[in-house]
Image: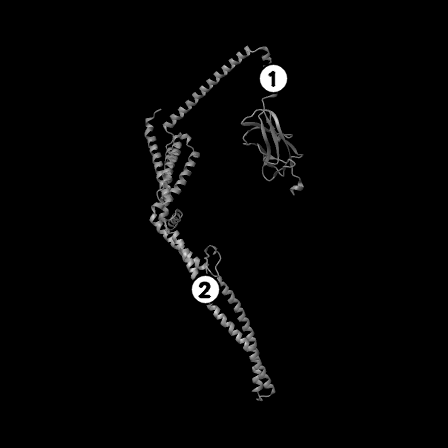
Amino acid sequence: MSLPSERARFTSLGGVVVGTTVMAMLTMAVALHAVFGGTHPLMFVVVPVWGLFVLSIDRWLISDTWRGIGILKLIPRLLLALAIGLVVSESLLLSLFAAEIKEQVTIDRQQHASQLRSRFDACNPVPGAGSAPAGCEAYRLPADSASLEALLLQRASLRAQVNQLQSAYDTKQQQLSQLHAQVMDECLGTKPGAGPRCRDLQAQELALEHGSVGPARNELSDRQADLVALEQEIAIAQRRAQAGLVTAKASRLQETSQSQSGQPSILEQYAALGRLVDDNPTVSLIEWALRLFVITIDCLPVLLRALSGRTAYDQLLEVTNVEDERRQALRTEAVTQKLRVELDLQSRLNERDELPDSFQDSIRAGIEKALKGPPVVNYNGWVDVEVLGPESVALSAVERRIVLSATTTFELEVTISSDQLGAVAEPVALRGGIDQSRVDFVVEVDSDRTSFRRSGRPITVGADGVPGRVRFEFIDVTPPAPPAWIWIRVSQERRTVQNLELTVEAQPALERR
């Protein structure tokens, strides 16, 4: 079969397939180079395998006839090209804007270090100088502040004592001032002189001064001196704790700087590329142009094959295929006829050579086989029934009744499997027959109402546990009154092997309310 006029077309199409494969290999190599940060031995395995994969897919798609290339075949290839274009274009951009990405990564690292320093400062205040805000668990630094915290507790206790002593001293000083005013009024008043009343008040003033006010003043002065000394100790401890926090913060910042001082990771590069795309419309335009370019190149063989229409080669190939199918059918029919004739001839020869006793035995065996039917296929499993429908239909598993609250449409799903799947189920146990990898059953729905009867439908169940299912649809069923009976019969070789009985009835009015 030769069509010289089509040679140039398909030669060009083959060149496009090879070019697409080479382009796919190059883009994959660039992507892996960006991922690994350089040449990696795995690239010499992945890149050729990827090229063969793309070549095989394109070859399979374009080798079919024009009529065979449907939209269902094109969609997976287009989705694959879209995924490749989205991933590979990013990798190509990493190589194209390597210098800008490296500069952006440096800026991002500096900003991260600045933000980390600010968080350390806010989340690690010196004890006694403030509290850390919420969300600082990851930024807390280790610091030896036990002695400082003990001093702060001691200062709080001492301040409470000073305040208490100050209050008591103020009360006593007020009493002393009132008594002194009485002394001044009595001794230096309208009739000045040191009379008995004046001397008595002066004695009380002196006793209050030396017995109560003076000791209170001295004790208050001692506690205030202790508080001043404690404040000095706290200031020293705070400077020591601050120095420890500064050292810990410098250590953490140095660790972060060392971890970010090497080659940028692929995630850092993609993040920097994303910021470049967001900030620069030119980079965004180049990104989409690369994506469309890669997607177009990747889909070019299939698109060209689909746009080329039905060629003379397709027509000739279709005619050839039809002729080959016709010849194969004739060969199959001839072989079948030959076998039928040979079997008929052999049967006649066997009937002529048989003895009368064997002839009678053969007739007897044939009659028994006709009466008993073919042997059953062994099976051990369950038949389950489930009702599928809206909320207006419900299956009571205990009473085995289907309750309808309104006119509705529902389906009965019958499943035969090796395990019990639902509550409405009965076992199916067939023994004494033959073993096969596939077991055939027939399920029918019988009823005392004609509208609920459904003819038998076959179910094939795998002996390895693969279940079989069949559904019977009941459209616009009105709740029957009185209830209707349904029998789901499972048979094999026209023998009923199991029967499930259900009723269909209307929901009582009390239950509907």
Q: State the residue position of label 2.
A: 238
* In front of the other: 301 or 268: 268
Point out residue 460 in the picture as x, y percentages from the top left corner.
55, 29
* The C terminus, quarter of image: top right
How crowded pointer 1 is (Cα within 10 Å; few <14, some 14-19, many 20+) is rated as few
* Label 2 vs 1, first from the N-terminus: 2
Identify the element where label 2 is drawn: helix
For label 2, the crowd category at 10 Å Cα-Cα, with few meaning under 14, some 14 to 19 and many 20 or more, is: many
Q: In the figure, 140 relative to 335: above or below?
A: below
- Say if residue 61 shows up in the picture: yes
Q: How many marks?
A: 2
Q: Quadrant of the N terminus?
A: top left
Horizontal and vertical percent for residue 455?
A: 59, 28
The reply to whether the C-beta atoms of the residues labelled 2 and 1 are less than 8 Å apart is no
Q: Name the residue: 37% across, 29% down.
A: 311
How far apart are the alpha carbons under marks 2 and 1? 111 Å
Q: Amino acid at mark 2?
A: Gln
Q: Is residue 303 left or right of residue 184?
A: left
In the rendered image of this protein, does residue 394 appear above or below residue 160? above
Return the x and y of residue 292 as percentages of the image width and height.
Answer: 37, 41
Task: Give, as a three-letter code, the residue at label 1.
Answer: Ile
Image coords of residue 310 (percent x, y): 38, 30
Mark whose residue sits in front, 2 or 1: 2
Is residue 214 rendered to the left or right of residue 485? left
- The front one of 486 and 256 is 256
Looking at the picture, tell me which residue is in the foreground, 113 or 76.
113
| 30 over 128 or under it: above or below | above
**Which residue in the protein does label 1 denote?**
367
In this view of the protein, can residue 455 be seen by the observer? no
Local SS, label 1: helix
